[in-house]
């Protein structure tokens, strides 16, 4: 699990991704008069739990951290990964801990039963690490989903997130929420900043996802300066900044 994984490519894989986006949808009606932004971290590295969280907290915000417990206490290409202390500190500061499977499985490459068993293992491991809050949100590793896993997981979680780079608007699919990466060097950060700025022209729910936050990041990570630049764009947008859990709860309450 230490080496980067590359999801399947080619025509068949592309068709499967398109099918997963249109099948097994579960609409979530978004407010038309309000902009919401959520900042999330996947896997998650210690740098996201320390440096990333510190940047968010300076703005008075909380984020959503999708945990793969199989990485806990270890080293990956993202660097040192989270541990029990990180979980406790994040929860104490009001951040949301969410689910990302135990082994960071690709849902398009394994059976639904195997995928669900790995999620159950993740929940048990996180509870053994001292997590007492419920896991309400889920993100598909690599953004890879299938109609069968979408249907099965919608019975367990209030929302499921993918990695299709866009802003959620109108009747979003709560079984595969869109999100925008905070990575890709300066060009990628420019796109993230523009996504936040666009909310002043066209409201919606913008979910950002990041990984490591360090001075020499991986290609899936960002520097502290880059994350701070995105956070400044978020502040300038005037959007409400909520965790995934809180955003869904508020939308359900006003539906």
Image (spheres, rainbow, N blue to C red):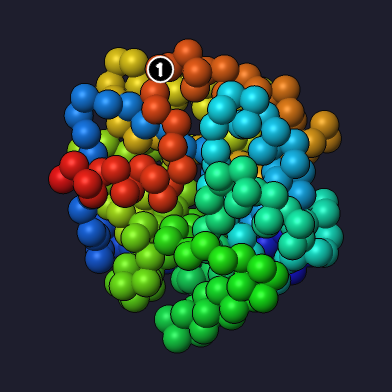
Q: In this view, does 152 lie to the left or right of 86?
A: left
Res 243 visible: yes
Give the camera-side residue of 12 and 134: 134
Q: In the rendered view of the protein, which quadrant contains the C terminus?
A: top left
Image position, residue 237 (x, y; %): 43, 17
From the viewer's perspective, is residue 88 above or below residue 35? below
Residue found at x 31% / y 49%:
249
Res 164 visible: no
Q: For numbered disc 1, what is the local secondary structure?
A: loop
From the viewer's perspective, is residue 148 above or below residue 166? below
Q: In the rendered view of the protein, which quadrant contains the N terminus?
A: bottom right
Image position, residue 111 (x, y; %): 46, 83
Q: Residues within 10 Å of mark 1 (few under 14, many from 20)?
A: some
Q: Is residue 90 left or right of residue 118?
A: right
Residue found at x 48% / y 58%:
139
Q: In this view, does 149 lie to the left or right of 121?
A: left
Image position, residue 69 (x, y; %): 67, 68
Count every numbered label the image shows and give the total.
1
Residue found at x 49% / y 22%:
234
Q: In which quarter of the image is residue 34?
A: top left
Residue found at x 83% / y 54%:
80
From the viewer's perspective, is residue 205 above or below residue 103? above
Q: Which residue corresponds to mark 1?
A: 238
Image position, residue 127 (x, y; %): 61, 73
Spot the residue most to the left: 255
Give the camera-side residue of 73 and 249: 249
Give the camera-side residue of 99 and 94: 94
């Amino acid at each position: 699990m230490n080496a980067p994984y590359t999801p399947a490519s080619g025509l068949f894989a592309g068709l499967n991704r398109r099918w997963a986006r249109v099948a097994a949808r579960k609409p979530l009606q978004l407010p038309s008069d309000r902009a919401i932004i959520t900042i999330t971290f996947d896997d998650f590295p210690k740098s996201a739990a320390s440096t990333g969280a510190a940047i968010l907290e300076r703005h008075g915000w909380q984020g959503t951290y999708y945990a793969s417990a199989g990485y806990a206490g270890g080293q990956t290409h993202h660097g040192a990964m989270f541990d029990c202390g990180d979980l406790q500190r994040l929860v104490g500061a009001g951040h949301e801990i969410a689910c990302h499977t135990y082994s960071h499985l690709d849902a398009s490459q394994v059976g639904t039963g195997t995928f669900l068993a790995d999620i159950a293992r993740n929940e048990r491991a996180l509870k053994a690490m001292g997590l007492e809050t419920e896991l309400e949100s889920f993100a598909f590793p690599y953004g890879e989903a299938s109609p069968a896993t979408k249907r099965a997981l919608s019975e367990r979680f209030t929302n499921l997130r993918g990695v299709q780079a866009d802003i959620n608007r109108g009747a979003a699919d709560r079984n595969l929420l869109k999100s925008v990466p905070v990575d890709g060097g300066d060009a990628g950060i420019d796109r993230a900043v523009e996504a936040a700025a666009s909310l002043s022209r066209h409201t919606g729910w913008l979910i950002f996802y990041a990984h490591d936050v360090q001075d020499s990041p991986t290609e899936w990570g960002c520097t502290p300066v880059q994350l701070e630049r995105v956070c400044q764009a978020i502040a300038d947008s005037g959007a409400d900044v909520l965790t995934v859990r809180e955003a869904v709860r508020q939308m359900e309450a006003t539906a």
